[in-house]
Image (cartoon, rainbow, N blue to C red):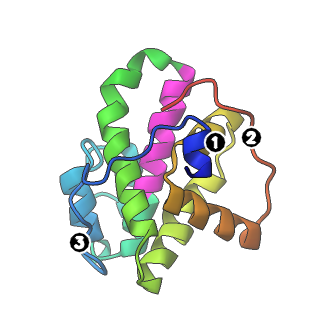
Amino acid sequence: MTERENTGCRKIQPGIAPRPPGRHGLVQYMVDNVKGLKESEAYEITFFGDHTEFLESDYLACCALGEYVLSMVDGVVDDPVGLEDIKPVLDVAFDILEQLSASDDDWIIAAVTSGAFDEIAICENDETFAAILHRLGPKSRELYDDWTHRMFPREPGAVPGIVL
């Protein structure tokens, strides 16, 4: 039994989202699989509207996903009533992060760490931050911990009041 299973965190079920396409094409993959991402403020801010020259950037795709997850979790921490509505979307988003974190492609790993994880790491709400860390799967949590220990050490947040 892994450490994450011992903490009572729900284990991510493989296959929630289809397998990522690998290098390039992540923007369309995420838009196709993460409900509401394209209409989100995170997407609008990251891609400056509909500038097609940015749509092949794996880094920006991961930035948008990280910011979208952060905004959804932050909203649920503030008002847990909406959790059931966004839980399926969060399941897919965290599944994608888990699959990308397990990639053998250094390019994908760099996009996940400097894109999605950078958005998560700058979270100012300790409860939101802790809830996201608690929800990461084993591969994404291992990658996140390794990356943050190298980039900017931070004390772990309090145990989340809400389990995603």
Mark 3 vs mark 2: give the one in front.
2
Q: Which residue is mark 2?
A: 157
Work out whether mark 1 precedes mark 3 in sequence or the reverse, and give the earlier one.
3
Query: What's under tag 1, amino acid-wise?
Result: Phe
Circle 2: element type: loop
Query: What's under tag 3, amino acid-wise?
Result: Thr
Q: Which residue is mark 1?
A: 129
- Residue 69 highlighted magenta (yes or no): yes
Instruction: State if disc 2 and disc 1 touch (CB < 8 Å).
Output: yes
Query: Would you place residue 137 above or below residue 115 in this image?
Result: above
Camera-side residue: 39 or 19? 19
CA–CA distance in space, label 3 to label 2: 38 Å
Magenta segment boundaries in residue numbering: 64-78
Work out whether mark 1 precedes mark 2 in sequence or the reverse, and give the earlier one.
1
Tell me the chief SS of the magenta region. helix
What crowding class fits label 1: few (fewer than 14 Cα within 10 Å), some (14-19), or many (20 or more)? many
Asked where in the image residue 84 lies, by quadrant, the reply is top left
Residue at position x 76%, y 46% from top?
Answer: 156
- 22 sits to left or right of 126: left
